[in-house]
Image (cartoon, rainbow, N blue to C red):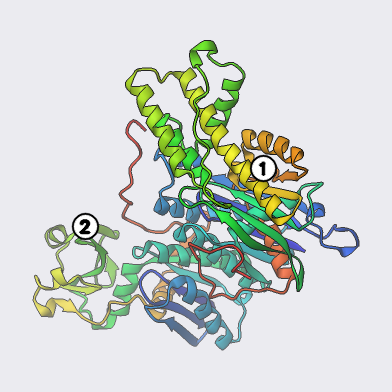
Amino acid sequence: MKLLALACATRGGGACLISDDAVHVEEYPPEITGGRGLLPAARHCLERGGLSARDLDYVAVCIGPGSFTGIRVGLAAALALVEASGAALLGLDSLSVLHHNARELLRPEDTVGALLGAGRGLVYVRRFRGGEPLEEPALMSLDVLLEQRPAEVYLGRIPESLAERLAPERLLQGFATLRPRPLAEATLMRIEDDARLDPLAARPLYLKRPPAKPLEGR
Amino acid sequence: MLILGLETSCDETAAAVLDTNGEANGEADDRKARVRSDIVSSQADFFAAYGGVVPELASRNHAARILPVVRRALAEAKATYADLDAVAATYGPGLTGALLVGLNFGKALAWGLGVPFVGVNHLAAHLQAPLLAEGAPRPPFVGLLVSGGHTALYAVDEAAERPGLLEFELLGETVDDAVGEAYDKVGRLLGVDYPAGPTLDRWAGEYSEGYGGDSAGPAEGFTRPMPAGLDFSFAGLKTAAARRIAELAAAGGLDDARKRSLAAGFQTAAVETLGEKALAACARTGLTSLIVGGGVAANSGLRAYLGRRAAEEGVRAFFAPLRLCTDNAVMIAARGRRLIESGLRHDLDLEAVACLELGVEE
């Protein structure tokens, strides 16, 4: 089984190849854009694994939420790779990846909120308990988050304004970056569940619309 | 060579397959290249409701449309991915988020297939489009690029060390609005949906055919904007049209007939400016062929005026085929083919360049 994962939904990202028992990871730093760093990272992974794109069984991609541009770069690249290789397309939301990366530090009885800042006082959030998601990813303000999505622990990219309102022990630090290896591992676990995507129907998970509105009367 | 072209620089998601295998004696000749498919999924109707392109929404639409457009281009070409010899995609200028969709799809596809990839300058491709038609001139010539984003004149010739590859020397460009942008802004004031150029062109034609009779009044007279040298300026013309529209609207006189006389006056000023500047460029360079590309090259007023005036000046004017005036991927494939044949390849780290200038991609 050969799976290539493309993580491009936040600043910094990379690729991870799981080839049978071997794992190859190549990451690019936050100052490099996904458009510049993602595909070279993927190529490095395949070269180290001695594979070509046509050897792949699966291409996994983080579909968001996150950087609008980043998730489109990732999805466009993933779509083309599955077209070229005949591999199956897998997709997973970014909050599940953040949660998966921290899973060994989490208590199964705790409700955990995985967060990504969405700007303008908003956050993307998805809660988990015992490793399973409780709701779909959502976009909300911090006040609504604390009222409607309470959790024992929050992790991810946590806005300072939220950190100031929570006791330090409720913040799990060090899991703010969406990394390719947990994307690959988490997607692998969900191949038979909900991670398979029809390439023609695959869409980025934006959750937020731009402010532009149609003209009056349209 | 069977090359797939991809175009997503603004609000058209386009893919095309160009076949150059039928060229006589193996000699590269764009006029003999066979367009096996030419698919354009336009967002113009979508953005009519917004009065113009919203970059983030355009990018979202590209992400949703790129795969079905590419599959359809291959199906119409009766080709498979395995048949492709190369992939070319626009990498600038344009809307960054929009460019990134086609560019990253193209880079990944070429890498996955193990075929060459090249990024194409959208402006160069617009000036390649006229050369795909039968009877097109061979360089050198003057190139007039007219669209919603660009208005510029170039001296165009083959690159000295890379035969067949066009290279460009900028002669003049707009110092403010592009001519297509002025059309859109005036059109919006007249209640015309984006993109307004085709409707204003039609209205101008209807006026000249007598629409409204005497009630239309004389065609509105606007000063031809003629900045020094070979540069253009359309902001003043746009403002003058806007003032006249406001005057007529305030007086209750902006009926359908008046709108057509305004369109006729505006169009006359715009196309005469473009035409005379282009002919001045020919005179300055001593070149006797002129090619015209870009969305505004489809304008019937420009085609009629420049066709007549060029003949009077002993210049041969050649326009892009109507279907290849607006954004399309055939022109991207045509330009990409020339770049690849010249030995150029782009690596997987090629980024989108929103303000890419003509002539710097090579």
* Chain under disc 1: B
Residue B221 appears left or right of A144: right
Within 10 Å of disc 1 (Cα), the crowding (few <14, some 14-19, many 20+) is: few
Specify the label residue B144 is tagged with: none
Q: Is residue B126 above or below residue A129?
A: above
- The relative height of residue B275 versus residue B81 in the rendered view (above or below) is above
Determine the residue positioned at 60% across, 37% down: B272
Q: Quadrant of residue B317?
A: top right
Q: Name the spot of residue B201 as percent of width and height, x first.
A: 57, 31
SS state under label 1: helix
Q: Which amino acid does the dot numbered 2 rest on?
A: Met
Residue B323's disc is 1
Locate the C terminus of chain B and report the quarter of the image it occupies: bottom right
Residue A36: x and y in percent read 49, 74
Q: CA distance from mark 1 to mark 2?
A: 46 Å
Relative to residue B136, is residue A185 depicted above or below? Answer: below
- In the displayed structure, would residue A135 be above or below residue A54? above
Other-residue count near label 2 (Cα within 10 Å), few / some / many at <14 / 14–19 / ≥20: some
Q: Are marks 1 and 2 on the same chain?
A: no
The label shown at residue A140 is 2
**Quarter of the image that includes the N terminus of chain B:** bottom right
Chain under label 2?
A
Q: Amino acid at mark 1?
A: Arg
